[in-house]
């Protein structure tokens, strides 16, 4: 069977590498892919927003399954596009339809969903420029810090956490009146700040049954000690040490089960991943957000720990037989550290030659922002590579990762040397 993965980052390289181990797959295609996917699959250069180009790719290459990596095509309705097309409707798409993708596409929708189905989350209200004064009044009922979230997709930049009430009011006005984040902030969700330690739990569902994948914790800030600007993610660890069986049982009972049941009650036929961003507040889970796809770089620590054939799980999703599929996890810790371009997450230069990654032998090097140019592999994005290792402990896995990073070079290469610093272990200095 031929399979197409949509996307171009580390998450998609991780999917490709995992799926390439399945004996049921004849050929893998990735659109548009990167220099890493190009080694194990056929890259096809198309714009993911051009659904007609996706259709042409599927029909020309006899694709029998499509796995959607990023959120934008899902929110824009790529799954619905397939179902509405006579020549595509029988090709399964791993990823929700537009109605399910609203869990990520609209913060207001997701908060209403949680409230409706009794899923623990922060107190909130939503506002537009028409009721701005009410927004100011709601802010005054909260304790700092104040959390403001653009309702729509804002490329990971639509969340503000502010300590000053006056600054929160100013930013609220800027978001709804001046469209600070474009159309995404026409509506803004204001919510109380959740205290605790953040982590993510990932669920794969066929709409009825589900498998809970390994938990993970990622590190968003560019600077060590979680300082500086937010990024798409500088590293991740799985499993999360503080997410013990008792906590994860609470997550399943209080969050996962009511989420799946809520989707069914609301008539949302959801097939794909649900990324549940959680806060662990003294052993009690509270949902920060839903995403409707796997996270990045969390995918790069979750997938290496899955022993099962990922394609067979996807078949279960497509046929609603997921409950019949065996699912097992490797009892090892996975750590990943992301190598980024100098200047990221602000302005950075591209086309820097990357060397040494081919010599890495004790870690997996996932490509993200890479491309082939003049017979060389060069940087093409802010997050360039993710280096993942497995070990019996976090320390062992991180030691392998940092040893592997020592072999890799490109001009301006930057990475955090303290991934895992907050998990009761010494800073992971080389």
Image (spheres, rainbow, N blue to C red):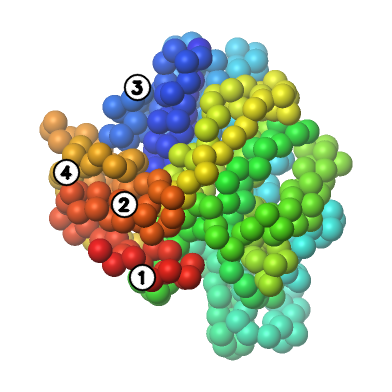
Name which quarter of the figure residue 327 lies in. top right
Q: Is residue 167 above or below residue 67?
A: below
Residue appearing at x 56%, y 39% in the figure: 329
Q: N-terminal of the two: label 3 or label 1?
A: 3
Distance Cα–Cα, label 2 vs label 4: 14 Å
Residue of label 3: 42
Residue of label 2: 401
Q: Is residue 48 above or below residue 259?
A: above
Q: Are marks 2 and 4 in contact (CB under 8 Å)?
A: no
Distance Cα–Cα, label 4 vs label 3: 23 Å
Q: N-terminal of the two: label 2 or label 4?
A: 4
Residue appearing at x 59%, y 69% in the figure: 197
Q: Is residue 117 above or below residue 160?
A: above
Regarding residue 250, the answer to whether it shows in the image is yes
Residue appearing at x 42%, y 37% in the figure: 14
Residue of label 1: 427
């Amino acid at each position: 069977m031929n399979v197409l993965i949509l996307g171009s980052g580390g998450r998609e390289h991780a999917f490709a590498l995992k799926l390439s181990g399945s004996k049921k797959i004849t050929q893998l295609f990735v659109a548009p892919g990167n220099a890493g996917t190009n080694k194990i699959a056929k890259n096809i250069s198309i714009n993911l927003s051009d659904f007609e180009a996706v259709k042409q790719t599927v029909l020309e290459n006899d694709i029998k399954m499509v796995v959607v990596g990023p959120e934008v095509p899902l929110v824009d309705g790529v799954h619905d596009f397939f179902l509405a097309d006579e020549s595509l409707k029988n090709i399964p798409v791993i990823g929700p339809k537009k109605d399910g993708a609203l869990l990520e596409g609209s913060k207001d929708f997701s908060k209403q969903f949680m409230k409706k189905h009794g899923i623990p989350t922060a107190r909130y209200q939503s506002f537009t420029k028409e009721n701005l004064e009410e927004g100011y009044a709601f802010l005054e009922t909260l304790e700092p810090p104040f959390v403001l979230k653009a309702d729509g997709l804002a490329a990971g930049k639509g969340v503000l956490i502010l300590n000053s009430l006056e600054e929160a009011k100013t930013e609220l006005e800027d978001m709804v009146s001046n469209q600070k984040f474009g159309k995404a902030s026409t509506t803004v969700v204001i919510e109380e700040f959740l205290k605790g330690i953040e982590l993510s739990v990932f669920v794969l569902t066929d709409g009825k049954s589900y498998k809970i994948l390994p938990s993970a914790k990622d590190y968003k800030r560019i600077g060590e000690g979680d300082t500086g600007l937010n990024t798409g993610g500088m590293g991740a660890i799985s499993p999360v040490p503080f997410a013990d069986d008792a906590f994860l049982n609470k997550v399943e009972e209080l969050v996962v089960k009511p989420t799946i049941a809520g989707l069914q009650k609301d008539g949302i036929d959801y097939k794909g991943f649900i990324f549940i961003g959680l806060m662990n507040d003294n052993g009690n889970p509270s949902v920060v957000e839903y995403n409707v796809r796997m996270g990045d770089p969390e995918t790069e620590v979750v997938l290496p720990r899955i022993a099962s054939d990922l394609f067979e799980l996807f078949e279960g999703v497509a046929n609603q037989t997921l409950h019949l599929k065996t699912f097992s996890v490797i009892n090892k810790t996975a750590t990943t550290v992301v190598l980024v371009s100098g200047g990221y997450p602000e302005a950075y230069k591209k086309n820097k030659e990357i060397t040494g990654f081919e010599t890495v032998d004790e870690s997996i090097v996932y490509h993200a922002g890479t491309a082939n140019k003049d017979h060389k592999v060069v940087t093409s994005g802010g997050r360039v590579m993710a280096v993942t290792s497995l070990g019996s402990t976090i320390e062992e896995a991180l030691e392998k990762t940092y040893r592997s990073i020592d072999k890799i070079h490109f001009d301006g290469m930057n990475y955090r040397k303290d991934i895992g610093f907050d998990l009761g272990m010494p800073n992971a200095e080389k």
